[in-house]
Amino acid sequence: MELSNRMTPLLFKDAFWGRDFISREGYDTLIDRLKDGRQICKDVQELIKMRAQAEEQYGKELVLIAHKARGLKEIGTLRASFDQLKAHIENIGNFHIHLSNVLEEEVKRIEIFQEKQKAQRKKFESIMEKLMKTKSSWYKKTMESKKNSKQRCQEATEAENLAAKMAATSSTPKIIEKAYQKVKHCKQTAAESESLYLGNIVHLENVRQDWIGTHQSTCEVFQQLESDRISFLRCVLWDHCNHFSMQCVKDDEIYEDVRKGLEKCEISTDNNLFVQTKSTSSSPPEPVMFRNYSVLLEESQGSPSNLSTLGRASVSESLSIIHRVGSNSSLTDGNPYSESTRNSSGSLNCSNTSGFQQTSSRASVALNDSYRVAYEYMAQNTDELTLLRGEVVQLMEQGDDGWWTVERDGEVGLVPGNYLAQI
């Protein structure tokens, strides 16, 4: 039964008649329905309009956020992902602004649709209002003629009965003739009123037939207007949902693109890039060497030019002597350097802070012995050799200036002797 009701459409023209001849109940019910339809159109229009404003504001906020989010201090793959996210946020904002424009177009479509429906509705409302006024007017005239005809017929009947009664009594012929003259006049008046009443009935019936046809046509038009309105609003709401579904899909695609970019974000890559672009030095600064300037100046007094040659040789000699002392006493505390002095014969002596006794700077060193690198050293000149802590080298030659010639894996070069510890 429910399926049958859904498949068979009910018609307005079969369901909205008045209960009596001049009743407006059915027509007014249809008019109220159309008014409700106009109101729901306005409600949908207002909803979309407010949503368009919200979308525009939201889109502009997203664009502003994308512009304000700087992130310029970041580097590498994370910077690329962050820039990609900002760009996509701006794109999403522009999409929402575009969606706002689309919704504004929908608002205009609803306005145009309402105006079109209003024109059709007003046309038939005007025809129906005019026809119902005519029907009501003729109905009133007909009811008045009916009342008048009834009254005249009653008067004629009463006059005829009175004349017959008078004729049966001993009334004079003159009185009886006068009574029959009245009967004749009353019958004539009754006939005229009856003819008028009949004419009004015929005309009213013509008006009624015209009204019935117009009412049926109006019901069909109103039903078509309602069908068009429901179909239109359904499509508008459907498109509205589709717009936001598409926007959600676009948003998800954009964020998926950002997620794919984040998958390429490598911690080691970014750290390596930072080291490669911002590196300051690959080794710690050189230690601060002790220089006994009183002795060095005494040795250089014979030749003032020697003051400029007190560089690597004197420092290296100090390093060599400090290393030999440190290997016996101070390597355990991680500092191979100790206070040093030079005796009256020109030999450089060292003493540590722990109170060890001084030792000679000419401790014996066996050639071709193996030494382990105690401290990392980066070559400063082409004749020097870079050392990494823990490497093992072979001593080739011990220089008097504190620089030793060593061999490592076929490479030969100068290194500070105090950076080596005998194995």
Image (spheres, helix red, strand yellow):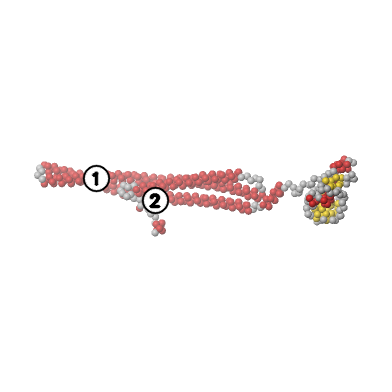
Residue beneath the point at 64% across and 53% down: 264
Residue 53 position within the rendered picture, expressed as x and y whole percent measured from the top left:
51, 44
Kindly indicate the quadrant of the structure image that contains residue 180. top left
* Badge 1 amino acid: Lys
Residue 147 falls left or right of residue 243:
left
Check the image and report above or below for 264 versus 305.
below
Residue beneath the point at 32% across and 50% down: 19
Residue 223: numbered disc = 2
Disc 2 secondary structure class = helix
Q: Nearer the viewer, residue 122 or 413?
A: 413
Residue 421 falls left or right of residue 22:
right
Disc 1 secondary structure class = helix
Residue 147: numbered disc = 1
Residue count near mark 1 (Cα–Cα under 10 Å), binned few <14, some 14–19, many ≥20: some
Q: Do the residues labelled 1 and 2 touch (CB within 8 Å)?
A: no
Residue 56 falls left or right of residue 271:
left
* Badge 2 amino acid: Gln
Residue 303 position within the rendered picture, expressed as x and y whole percent measured from the top left:
89, 41
Residue beneath the point at 35% across and 52% down: 15
Image quarter hosting the N terminus? bottom left
Report if residue 422 is visible in the image: yes
